[in-house]
Image (cartoon, grey):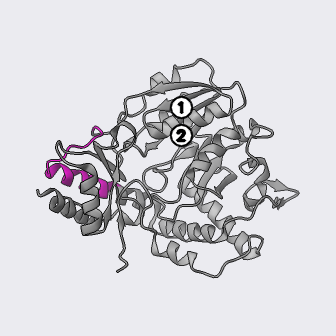
């Protein structure tokens, strides 16, 4: 029997019904005027969830990892100094991508599970070209103060990973000084994976690499998908051909964003916070220890230490097979000693909190 599985790990959240239904609609051509209207509206809604007025805010036709690569290949020239705050797996990936662009990478290492030390990052180099940090570190469930990095960045560009934060917690790209940001659709936005919500401000775009190492991710060739509010040429939006856009995925994102903004972004953030608070309190009532210290925990992604003597993989398998619930293992050095439980998008609800707590109580025999 086919059953719905409740995805409570760091991977895809259960999509909103509107987003799922949009995937089943008849396909539009990528140059169809109706699709161009949907794309324009999607870009405008993305500006709202990013908290930006950037004209170049759009869903890149790839997952969040490609969004990360697009951010670096378009803004990092060989020899540029790139300071990267590393407090988990995705900060580590940033250092790898920056190095492949020929950057002089200054990695500011932190203990996993700790928020970024803003002072150490800002003092790591006197004149970096780019400062890069993860807002919500998916591998550990910790939130870092991106606004403080933006306030102290000086002439550097601030590049931010918002994959797990967008649509789940407060995100204000313009107010916080974020120059380049990338995200994913599959977490708090509640849309299937496949697009990378992306934004780049004029300050960063003016410093871009003329011919990036990636043809596909060259932002200079993506003008045709910025929309009527985007790059202008003689009063008309540029729509140069670059590649065939994934029309069904864009329509699905459009539906998901419409649903989120109808609820209200502040209300969506509050819903995620309430669900996360309730889950974390319930986990501690079960005698489980949370991985991240209070004050730095993400509400949408909770990390829990696996109790001593408990087989992490066996518990995750039992949750999936007996209750249809999938939680994630830890990452890197904590692969077998931490669980990651996500309440994102449609899963950020009181009934899901009760469901996961009851299932864990059953499987752990508590």
Residue 87 position (above or below residue 229):
above
Residue 286 placed where, x, y %? 14, 52
Magenta region, residue range: 273-293
Residue 347 position (above or below residue 133):
below
User: Which residue does the image show at 48% across and 66% down from the upper left?
Assistant: 260
Q: Which residue lies furthest to the top in this view?
A: 126
Q: Do the residues labelled 2 and 1 touch (CB within 8 Å)?
A: yes
Label 2, on which residue? 176
Q: In this view, does 176 lie to the left or right of 128?
A: left
Q: Residue 151 carries which label?
A: 1
The CA span between labels 2 and 1 is 7 Å
User: Which residue does the image show at 68% across and 29% down from the upper left?
Assistant: 102
Q: Is residue 340 left or right of residue 80?
A: left
Residue 258 position (above or below residue 240):
below
User: Do we see residue 51 in this rendering?
Assistant: no
Q: Which residue lies furthest to the right in this view?
A: 234
Q: Is residue 161 left or right of residue 111?
A: right
Q: Is residue 359 left or right of residue 75?
A: left
Compare marks 2 and 1 and give the one earlier in the sequence.
1
Q: Residue 345 carries which label?
A: none
Q: Quadrant of the C terminus?
A: bottom left
Residue 227 position (above or below residue 134):
below
User: Do we see residue 26 in this rendering?
Assistant: yes
SS at badge 1: helix
User: Which residue does the image show at 18% across and 48% down from the upper left?
Assistant: 284
Magenta region includes residue 97:
no
Q: Quadrant of the N terminus?
A: bottom left
SS at badge 2: helix
Magenta region includes residue 288:
yes
When asked about the image quadrant of residue 114, the answer is top left
Residue 330 placed where, x, y %? 35, 45
């Amino acid at each position: 029997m086919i059953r719905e599985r409740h995805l409570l790990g760091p991977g895809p959240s259960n999509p909103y019904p509107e987003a799922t239904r949009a995937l089943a609609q008849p396909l539009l051509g990528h140059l169809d005027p109706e699709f161009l209207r949907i794309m324009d509206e999607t870009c405008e809604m993305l500006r709202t969830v990013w908290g930006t007025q950037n004209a170049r805010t759009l869903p890149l036709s790839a997952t969040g990892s490609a969004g990360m690569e697009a951010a670096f290949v378009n803004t990092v020239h060989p020899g540029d100094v790139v300071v990267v705050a590393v407090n988990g797996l995705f900060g580590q990936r940033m250092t790898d991508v920056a190095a492949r662009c020929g950057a002089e990478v200054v990695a500011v290492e932190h203990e996993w599970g700790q928020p970024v030390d803003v002072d150490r990052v800002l003092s790591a180099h006197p004149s970096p070209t780019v400062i890069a940090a993860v807002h919500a570190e998916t591998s550990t469930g910790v939130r870092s103060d991106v606004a403080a990095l933006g306030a102290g960045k000086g002439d550097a560009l601030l590049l931010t990973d918002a994959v797990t934060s967008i649509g789940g917690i407060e995100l204000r790209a313009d107010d916080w000084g974020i120059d380049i940001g990338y995200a994913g659709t599959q977490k708090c936005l509640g849309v299937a994976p496949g697009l990378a919500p992306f934004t780049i401000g004029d300050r960063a775009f003016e410093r871009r690499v003329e011919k990036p190492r990636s043809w596909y991710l060259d932002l200079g060739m993506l003008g045709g998908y910025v929309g009527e509010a985007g790059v202008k040429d003689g009063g008309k939006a540029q729509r140069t051909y670059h590649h065939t856009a994934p029309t069904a995925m864009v329509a699905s994102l459009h539906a998901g964003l419409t649903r989120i903004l109808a609820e209200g972004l502040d209300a969506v953030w509050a819903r995620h916070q309430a669900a996360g608070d309730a889950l974390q309190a319930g986990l501690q009532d079960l005698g489980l220890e949370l991985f991240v210290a209070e004050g730095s925990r993400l509400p949408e992604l909770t990390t829990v230490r696996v109790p001593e003597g408990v087989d992490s993989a066996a518990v995750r398998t039992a949750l999936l097979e007996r209750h249809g619930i999938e939680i994630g293992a830890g990452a890197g050095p904590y692969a077998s000693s931490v669980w990651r439980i996500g309440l994102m998008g449609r899963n950020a609800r009181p009934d899901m909190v009760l469901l996961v707590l009851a299932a864990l109580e059953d499987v752990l025999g508590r």
